[in-house]
Image (tube, helix red, strand yellow):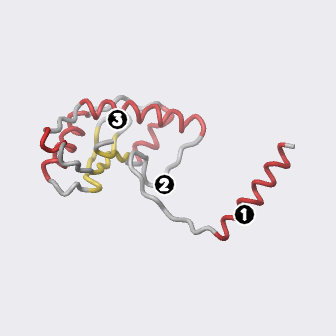
Amino acid sequence: KAQSAIERLKQKMKGSSKTAKVEKVKKGNVISSGDSFSGLDKIKFEEYFGKMKTHLNQNWNLPQWLDDANLKAQVQVNIDGRGVVMKRDILTSSGNSVFDNTILAAVDSSSPFPTPPDRLKSSLSRSAIIFNFPN
């Protein structure tokens, strides 16, 4: 029964992929450059990413007047195997340089991030992690 169900799903997917237009959606708070985690690596990444976000948010000090402005931005962060920030860039600017600079200052203050799990170190050292502000 299970094999039959899998075959039906495969056939259904083949048919829907021909008619459906695939759009590439750019989302924040994901690892970039095409790396995809699955299974245990995905679980480890999501757990580690949660720790990184918590650590980063503890270092982000936003003045009230900027908080009321409802600004949004994305930052791209590259870390090494020890969690040290090697590079950080504003990926999507809020249009307000003060807001953007508070994000970069938070990234700088957060370095080093918690040490990544051994099984993720190689991938994370080759790829960037994107954070949305505010989350």
Mark pair 2, 1: CA separation:
23 Å
Q: Which of marks 1 and 3 is nearer the N terminus?
A: 1
Q: Nearer the viewer, residue 15 or 110?
A: 15
Classed neighbour count for the residue bearing mark 1: other residues with Cα under 10 Å, few (<14), some (14–19), many (≥20) = few
Horizontal side of residue 125 vs 77, given as left or right? right
In the shown orientation, is residue 33 left or right of residue 111? right
Say what secondary structure mark 3 lies in.
helix
Of pointers 2 and 1, the one earlier in the residue sequence: 1
* Residue plotted at (43% across, 47% down): 31
Which quadrant, please, contains the C terminus? top left
Q: Do the residues bearing badges 2 and 3 touch, measured as CB atoms within 8 Å?
A: no
Q: In x, y percent, where is residue 84?
A: 30, 36
| Mark 2 or 3, closer to the camera | 3
Q: How crowded is mark 2: few (under 14 residues within 10 Å), some or many (20 or more)?
A: few
- What residue did someone put label 3 on? 53
Position in image of residue 113 (x %, y %): 32, 32
- Identify the residue at horizontal 17%, vertical 38% (top origin): 62
Q: Which amino acid does label 2 sit on?
A: Gly
**What residue is disc 2 on?**
34
Which residue is label 1 attached to? Answer: 14
At 14% from the left and 38% from the top, the residue drawn is 64
Local SS, label 1: helix
Residue at the extreme front: 68
Question: How far apart are the alpha carbons under marks 1 and 3?
Answer: 38 Å
Q: Are marks 1 and 3 in contact (CB under 8 Å)?
A: no
Mark nearer the N terminus (2 vs 3): 2
Which numbered disc covers residue 3? none
Question: Horizontal and vertical percent for residue 81?
Answer: 38, 36
Q: Which amino acid type is shown beneath numbered disc 1?
A: Lys
